[in-house]
Amino acid sequence: MAKRPGAGGIFLVAVILGLIAAYLIWTYLQNVDKRNTKNWQPVVIAVTDIKARAKITRSMIRVEQYPKDLIAENAKTKIEEVENRTAQRAISPKEQIRSSDLVAEGQAPTYAFKIPEGMRAIAIGAGEVMSAGSSVQAGDHVDILATYQDPRTRQELTKMILQNVEVLWVNKGETDPNAKGGGANSSMTVAVTPEQGELLAAADRAGALRIQLRPVHDDTVVRSPGVTARDFVGSKIPEEVPGGSADQRTPISIVVPSNQRRNEITIYKGSAESQAAP
């Protein structure tokens, strides 16, 4: 009669069979994974928030392997296809980057990309006299002057209403095909804050606008009360000129009488009269 194995022998056999089964299962799963990853493909994804209009750098993106059926249509598969390109829209982290997310190669971004953040673009008429001839170009900075009737004094006033304004682009809409530029329909588009846009639109409605071209790298802001017609003869009142004196509002006239016996002239300053040799 054969001797039956003890409990220890049965347990050992069970452990060995379990290890064999585990190895076979692991080997099978490894083979399945290998077969599955053969269908995976590289795709470029964002690793950080990418703002619209931003230039995409190498640190903003990376390549990851994705199952083929989870890759978005027209997704980029190479870093070189995305690096140094401009984002057409905002892109979130881990989002696949597609062709439609980028400004097309060889295509200039829309004018909206040129507007500084927080600013608005507004166009004003830009005839040759009004806009400092044909010298103003995109990228220049200008001062904008308005001539209008002061509602308080009812006098015509010319004043710088905006200073150091960036010119975004100049449109020389020529009405004469033989003209050299600066046609009647020319316009100039400048970058302003929303509030400055309201001011500029109101000033354009109320009177006439002129442009002063500023030197390069000059960001000085000049405080000026404006000029009226009476200031042409030196009658600017002291309240309008910081540190002004009473003499500033009295025009000075020099008169040479024809009946003077000596070589002298008479100077009238207000009601005062004095004599002086020529």
Image (cartoon, grey):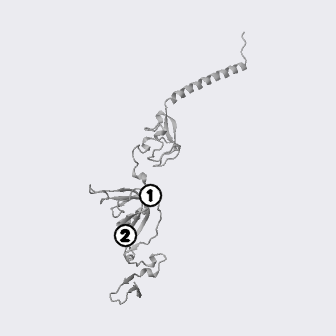
Q: State which quarter of the image contains the C terminus.
A: bottom left
Using the rendered view, name the quadrant where residue 231 is placed: bottom left
Q: State which quarter of the image contains the N terminus.
A: top right
Residue 103: give x, y in percent of width and height.
42, 45
Residues at marks 2 and 1, CA–CA distance in whole angstroms: 25 Å
Is residue 249 something that shows in the picture? yes
Residue 5: give x, y in percent of width and height.
72, 16
- Residue 78 against residue 152 in the figure, above or below: above
Q: Nearer the viewer, residue 252 or 128?
A: 252
Residue 77: give x, y in percent of width and height.
47, 37
The residue beneath circle 1 is 119
Q: Nearer the viewer, residue 15 or 127?
A: 127
Q: Nearer the viewer, residue 7 or 139?
A: 139
Q: Nearer the viewer, residue 17 or 245?
A: 245
Q: Residue at point 44% right, 82% down?
A: 247
The residue beneath circle 2 is 147
Q: Amino acid at mark 2?
A: Thr
- Residue 38 against residue 224 in the figure, above or below: above
State which mark lies toward you, 2 or 1: 2
Residues at badges 2 and 1 in contact (C-beta under 8 Å)? Answer: no
Q: Residue at point 41% right, 72% down?
A: 226
Is residue 269 something that shows in the picture? no
Q: Amino acid at mark 1?
A: Met
The residue carrying pointer 1 sits among few (fewer than 14), some (14 to 19) or many (20 or more) residues within 10 Å by Cα, namely some
Residue 42: give x, y in percent of width and height.
49, 35
